[in-house]
Amino acid sequence: MPLNRRTIEAKSEIRRHLSSIEKKHITPGRSSILEATFRLLASGGYASISMRNVAKSVDLKPSSIYSHFPNGRDEIIVEALRWNYHSWGTELLDSIDKTDNAHEVWDRLVDVYVRRQLTIPYHDIWDMLWSMDQISEFLPAACRDELGSWLKMLHNLISSIIIDMGFVHNEQSAHLVISILDSVTSWCGWSGKEEDLAHHVQTANTITRMILQRHDVFEVPPKIMPAFADAMGPAER
């Protein structure tokens, strides 16, 4: 099945956004520092990020780090989050741009998603920081808005591809599919061996397609709630 206009526009929106932040924020000098920042986050958590630790991890003086990130630790965290989703989005577009068939696009999306989630621990750190911010709001408001916009663009693309594949779109199903892909490290039991990755990609593909085929799974039959209420005792109501 070919891609419809909505999917093409969703891809273009992501491409424009990634291009704009690359020109403003993603430079070769910064990239190595940001990658090191995520390595520190993965090994030592949020508290491990300091200008001294980041400088040591890339064999630079702290003053050199400040030349790239004059606003210090908070700026590095924000830029690291931006760098991570830029890398992920760029690889995704590079892969799905190679076909106009919706089912093949889905296969490629799941492949990139699962392989990166399993082989790059930064993704789980990104998800963790985003989830933490939803509770404590420690990120700058502008950063929170940007990350929220990115997730909305990604969700829009995924929803459009689902429709292109011929499935009945359901917001809850789309959210569940994304949750399955985001949490693949927690349920797939990857051995850490490269040769096993293809199996986990296929498993994730099968699971997500099963969910999409059952678009009625979130529909509540009208008789369920009254029946449930009748089964409850007076003290429970």
Image (cartoon, rainbow, N blue to C red):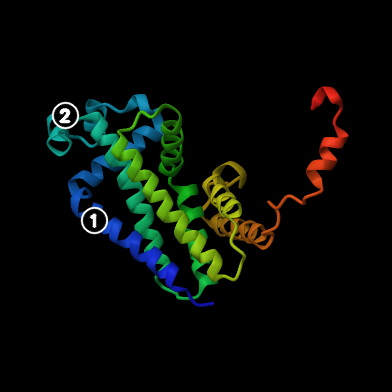
Give the percent coordinates (x, y) of residue 166: 60, 71
- Going from the N terminus, do you reach mark 1 or mark 2 first? 1
* Residue bearing the label numbered 2: 62
Give the percent coordinates (x, y) of residue 147: 36, 44
Q: Residues within 10 Å of mark 1 (few under 14, many from 20)?
A: few
Q: Residue at x 35, y 37 (%)?
A: 39
Give the percent coordinates (x, y) of residue 171: 57, 54
Viewer-closest of 212 and 226:
226
Whether residue 53 is visible, yes or no, is yes
The residue under label 2 is which amino acid type?
Answer: Pro
The residue under label 1 is which amino acid type?
Answer: Ser
Give the percent coordinates (x, y) of residue 16: 28, 61
Viewer-closest of 29 and 193:
29
Q: Element type at marker 1?
A: helix
Q: Residue at x 61, y 44 (%)?
A: 187
Q: Residue at x 82, y 48 (%)?
A: 223
The part of the image, by quadrant, that contains residue 208 is bottom right
Viewer-closest of 78 and 184:
78
Q: How many marks?
A: 2
User: Horizontally, is 178 left or right of 95 in the view?
Assistant: right
Viewer-closest of 231 and 182:
231
Q: Residue at x 58, y 41 (%)?
A: 186
User: Horizontally, is 83 left or right of 221 in the view?
Assistant: left
User: Horizontally, is 134 left or right of 40 in the view?
Assistant: right
Q: Element type at marker 2?
A: helix
Q: Quadrant of the N terminus?
A: bottom right
Whether residue 36 is visible, yes or no, is no
Above or below, comparing residue 40 to residue 172 in the picture: above
* Residue bearing the label numbered 1: 20
